Image: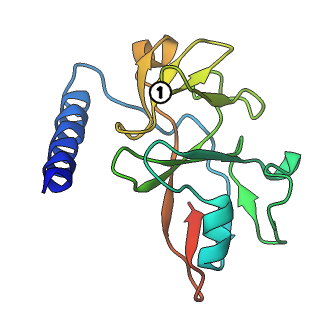
């Protein structure tokens, strides 16, 4: 019973926060990063259990050009967007995905990383911070918050052709 109440409360907090962010004076721009192909397949539950996200605030990076993770079974049709993919599990345990490139810098090799103390995605170059665990990659601080730049979001869902999960655009 307590878990159900917590889940409802968490859902309410997320919805209220998102509504506040959407109705603020500034609009949110999540189109700063160029549209690039994204295709990461998890054909089986076992692969998701190894390379996916397992619970609230879990995260992983996928960067094909750097072979991150090093042992991930990338294929000829794999693609990881402009700067790579940040796969997270939000506060309710649902998987979400974002491009790793900072939208302020808009360069393939200037990427955000999870700051484990603040539990935000942070750009070391410009200092912008993004909420990836409850606010869909919206900016929290730095130049991104001033300009209203959010991280580019990607689709995470049931895989096509019988795959367990897929991240795509």
Which residue is drawn at the image coordinates 31% and 28% (left, top)?
27
Q: What is the quadrant of the N terminus in the image?
A: bottom left
Q: Nearer the viewer, residue 22 or 75?
A: 75
Which residue is drawn at the image coordinates 19% and 29% (left, top)?
20
Residue 28: horizontal and vertical position, in percent? Answer: 36, 31
Q: Which of 30 and 21 is in front in this view?
A: 21
Q: What is the quadrant of the C terminus in the image?
A: bottom right
Q: How many labels does the image show?
A: 1
Q: In this view, does 146 lie above or below 154?
A: above
Res. 28 in view = yes
Residue 10: horizontal and vertical position, in percent? Answer: 22, 42
Q: In this view, does 145 lie above or below 51?
A: above
Neighbour tally class for label 1: few under 14, some 14-19, many 20 plus, Cα within 10 Å: many
Instruction: Give the residue number, with chain letter if any, for mark 1.
Output: 130
Which residue is drawn at the image coordinates 84% and 72% (left, top)?
76
Quick one: SS at disc 1? strand
Residue 86 left/right relative to 63: left
Q: Nearer the viewer, residue 20 or 131?
A: 131
Residue 42: horizontal and vertical position, in percent? Answer: 65, 72
- Residue placed furthest toward the bottom: 162
Res. 39 in view = no
Res. 39 image quadrant: bottom right
Q: Which of 57 and 95 is in front in this view?
A: 57
Residue 139: horizontal and vertical position, in percent? Answer: 42, 24
- Residue placed furthest toward the front: 1
């Amino acid at each position: 019973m307590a878990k159900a109440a917590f889940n409802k409360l968490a859902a309410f907090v997320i919805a209220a926060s998102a509504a506040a962010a959407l109705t603020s004076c500034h609009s949110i721009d999540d189109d700063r990063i160029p549209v690039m192909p994204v295709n990461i397949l998890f054909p089986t539950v076992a692969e998701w259990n190894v390379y996916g996200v397992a619970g609230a605030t879990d995260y992983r990076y996928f960067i094909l050009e750097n072979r991150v993770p090093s042992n991930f079974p990338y294929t000829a049709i794999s693609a990881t967007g402009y700067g790579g993919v940040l796969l997270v599990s939000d506060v309710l345990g649902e998987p979400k995905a974002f491009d790793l490139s900072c939208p302020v810098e808009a360069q393939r090799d200037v990427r955000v990383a999870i700051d484990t103390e603040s539990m935000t995605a942070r750009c070391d170059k410009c200092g912008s911070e993004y909420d990836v665990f409850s606010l869909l990659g919206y900016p929290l601080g730095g130049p991104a918050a001033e300009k209203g730049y959010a991280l580019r979001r990607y689709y995470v869902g049931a895989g096509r052709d019988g795959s367990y999960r897929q991240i795509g655009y």
